[in-house]
Amino acid sequence: MAKRKRKPAAQNVVSINGGPILAPYEPRPDVVKALEEALEKARSGEIIGVAAAFVHGDDCTSMAMCGRVTRAMMGALHILLSDLAVDRR
């Protein structure tokens, strides 16, 4: 009797949003692009302060804050939190 080859379970996983499912430590092109654009603006002096939250490949999180952080940034972060609660990418 011939043995059937089975796909690994991970190959059967489908994204709810229809996008590709990347390996935990595979670079995400959208993240790389956003960070490169921000770095370019920081190098030109356009961005002078940062407050960021990061999700790592193992789902751990970290954060960073540096430069000029103002009350206006708190407003922008509040809007971002509201968007995250609705969008849930």
Image: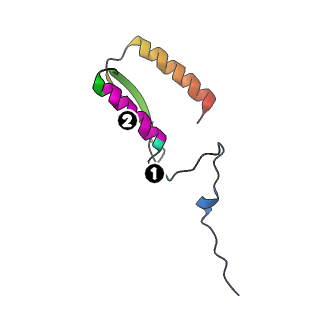
Let me know if residue 63 appears in the view.
Answer: no
**Relative height, residue 81 to residue 23 (above, below):** above
Residue at the spot of label 2: 36
Question: Gap in Å between the C-alphas at discs 2 and 1?
Answer: 17 Å
- What residue do we see at 65% from left, 42% from top? 17
Q: Is residue 22 above or below residue 3?
A: above
How has the structure been colored for display?
A: rainbow
Residue displayed at 39% across by 25% down = 51
Q: Please provide percent x and percent y for residue 81.
A: 54, 24
| Amino acid under disc 2 | Glu
**Residue at the spot 34% in from the left edge and 31% down from the top edge:** 39
Mark 1 element type: loop
Looking at the image, residue 43 lies above or below residue 55: above
Helix, strand or loop: magenta stretch: helix
Q: How many marks?
A: 2
Quadrant in which the C terminus appears: top right
Going from N to C along the chain, the mark reached first, 2 or 1, is 1
